[in-house]
Image (cartoon, rainbow, N blue to C red):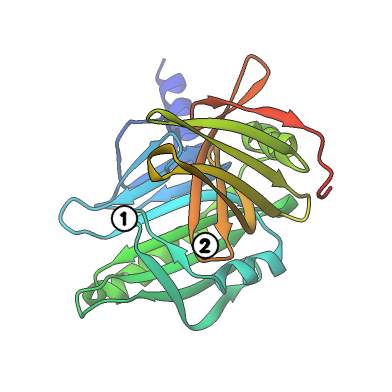
Amino acid sequence: MRLLISLFLFVTVLFGVELELDKNYAGPKKLTVSQLGVNMGLPHRWEAIAKEGEGLVLFQQETQDTMVLRSKSLNISEAIAYLNEPHYLKNSVKVFPQERIVKLNSRIYRRAYSSNGGQDRPSVLIYVILGPQERAVVMKVQYAGKNDSAIKATTMNIAQALSFTPTKQLKSSIQNLEARLEGAHIAYVKRDGAYDDKRELWLCSNRRYLLQEERTVAGGMSRVHEQKYGKWSVENEQLVLQGDDGLDRLIDVKFQDNALIFDGHRSYELKNHQCK
């Protein structure tokens, strides 16, 4: 019996505790995070919780410092392009690249960002940790500037110790969703009060998109047609539309009865004559 307990403790330390959604974990602890396809360490005095569609959130009770980790599909050139773009934090604050991209090693890149605002604006770091087969984890860190040294040391330790699980252990829902959406032409109608708003979306294989919207205005007296362009990606069962106009849009996407459900509305898949 004692041997079995020792073996169980050894396996827990080696592979980590399998993280469950909506459950708090307190560090220090080694976690296996299937949503990200990684094993990682949770530092002392930090807590972690994963929520559907929100990624893995690390936080401290006594500070406002947070880290949000999400999985992405990126190669080196795509990672550099990603770090050159403005980004949004969870509270919808837009942050812009500052300084230069820091190459910490062949698979870890980091850049500092800042937002418009006064002296109390948060400091921001974004890490890209590259893995095999163009798998990657993006870590967005928001923290008080006075904690700069401690945060940089902690996040460096997390990034360096993070390891990707074998592909067979990675949940395939994100890859399946990406494959289903790539090259798709999708139409759906969203109810807005007494009026229906029609949306058509073309998702090209080069990760560009075209969005056409037909909306009712002036109390139903007229219709407005708009076209929007940008880049698309999939993160945690959400379609992320990064618009060329600087606006980002998150759309919840689910499979139901062999159909794609966009923001709770059934979609219709049409032939794509715009792009591949």
Horizontal side of 221 relative to 101 (left or right) equals left
- Judge depth for marks 1 and 2 and give the one in front: 1
Which x, y percent locates residue 246? 50, 66
Callout 1 touching callout 2 (CB < 8 Å): no
Q: Kindly tell me whether residue 216 is visible in this rendering.
A: yes
Residue type at mark 1 is: Asn
Mark 1 to mark 2 CA distance (whole Å): 27 Å
For the residue labelled by badge 1, is the local secondary structure a helix, a strand or a loop? loop
Which residue is tagged 1?
Answer: 91
In the picture, residue 218 is in which quadrant? top left
Instruction: Work out whether 191 lies above or below 59.
Output: above
Where is residue 254? Give x, y as percent: 57, 27
Q: Quick one: 78 or 41, which is closer to the camera?
A: 78
Residue at (43, 76) in percent of width and height: 112
Mark before the other along the chain sequence, 1 or 2: 1
Whether residue 171 is visible: no
Depicted 122 relative to depicted 70: above or below: below
Residue at left offset 69%, top offset 38%: 175
User: What amino acid type is highlighted by mark number 2?
Assistant: Gln
Residue 12 to residue 159: above or below: above
Q: Which mark is residue 160?
A: 2
